[in-house]
Image (cartoon, grey):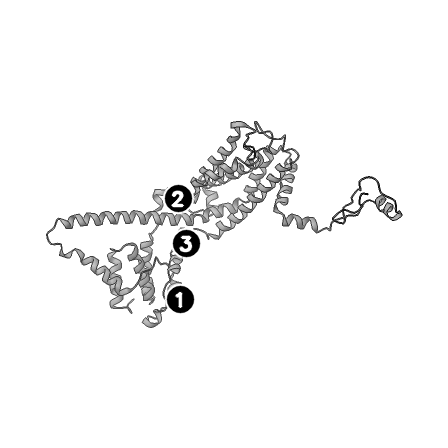
Amino acid sequence: MPLCRDTFGFVSDPSCTLDLELGRPHHGPPRIRNKPSSPLEDPLALILSPTQLGVQWWEGAHTATGLPWWAAIPTTTLLLRGALMPLSLRAYAASANAVAAAAEQQCQAQRRQAQEEEQREGERQLAGKAGGAGVGAPGEQQVGVQTQLGPSSSGSSGTKSSNASGGGNGGGSSTAGAELGRMDVVRRVFNHLRHLHGVPSFGWYLGNTAVQVSLVVSLSLALRRMSDSLWPGFTGEGLLYFQDLTAPPVYLQTLSTPYGTAGAILPLALVLLYVSAADRSAGGSSPGIHIALKLLVVPLYCTALLQPHAVLLYWMAQAASQLGIYELAARLPPLRRAARVPELLLAPRSHTSNAGPTVDEILLELSESYAKAGNTTAARTCLNALLTRQPLHQQAVKRLQALSSNPYSA
């Protein structure tokens, strides 16, 4: 005899309940009547399930636009990216932090190469002279200064307010405790360069990444779920050769290709858009980041071959919109000024290393400001960091000798 109450406790129809009360067997399958949900259950389920919320978003956009699915997906994506363009532009401006760091690394590498060439040339000239006794004098003088002043740090920067907070009373014992740690020095140099070029906080970049990644993952999983469930319209509202948006270029289970070699068109187009956007991004200015971005091409292409064409359309629109943001920022100065995008992002890579003062000049200038404020320990730290970068910097050696001979002088 069929039961009139299912496993989850849902009540059957009244006829089945009446048969049980009268002791008569109920023939036929029971008609289950679901228990009505509370008004808060559906919105709460959407909030706790981003994928379900993405499904509702795609269906609502498809209904509102009235376009077929092959056009509704990229159109909705472009509209969403347009609504988030202010955040994307601020994040693009904040990515100039990576450009400034890459420019400084490039400048330091060029300077180090020039120093090595000068050193080799000097060694060749000194080797041809008979009196080579004075060859080690500069090196011995440098070693003596380094030994006298202690270990070196890595770069320093600060403002006059930080100098005053570091101790401005000129007392040697009171300023000795105001030392600059390695991370503190690096942080101050980085902040100085960021304010110098008008670069916004890196938090904008992190915030935009959190928002964009959450949207991409949720909407991609929603399209994947809709493709797996054969959502109405997905099987017949495609374009050209991919009329079925639920089919991927390659079925991994059977290694079959439903669209043949044409199935690789969208994955290849996606890779080209990604490479173009990576070249225009701020990470393209750093050799290490640029190589890492290029290495992601292979896993991106392999992943794209296994995705339904509905997901590929969304990814292509996403990559095209990102590339469009870079082009708009480069071609529209009013938009660039409104978003406060620094010119450092648009300068050629060969010119970025010459934009503004170098870190060595900043260290030399700020060591003087620390010494004037009475913080001789911080001044020594800046000069030692400069000598670590350029061991033969004569001006830094002279200032270190002046501080060691008269530590209370401004």
Residue in the picture at 13% in, 56% down: 133
- In the image, taking residue 406 as reference, residue 185 lies left or right, namely right
Per the image, the residue denoted by label 3 is 195
Which amino acid type is shown beneath numbered disc 1?
Ser
Residue in the picture at 87% in, 45% down: 19
SS for dot 1: helix
Per the image, the residue denoted by label 2 is 285
Q: Which numbered marker is on residue 52?
A: none
Residue in the picture at 89% in, 47% down: 22
User: Which quarter of the rendered picture does the C terminus lie within?
Assistant: bottom left
Label located before the other in sequence (3 or 1): 1
Question: Mark 2 and mark 1 in contact (Cβ < 8 Å)?
Answer: no
Packing grade of label 2 (10 A; few <14, some 14-19, many >=20) is many
In this view, the residue farthest toward the left is 130
Label 3 – label 2 distance at C-alpha: 20 Å
Label located before the other in sequence (1 or 2): 1
User: Which quarter of the rendered picture does the N terminus lie within?
Assistant: top right
Q: Nearer the viewer, residue 273 or 197?
A: 273
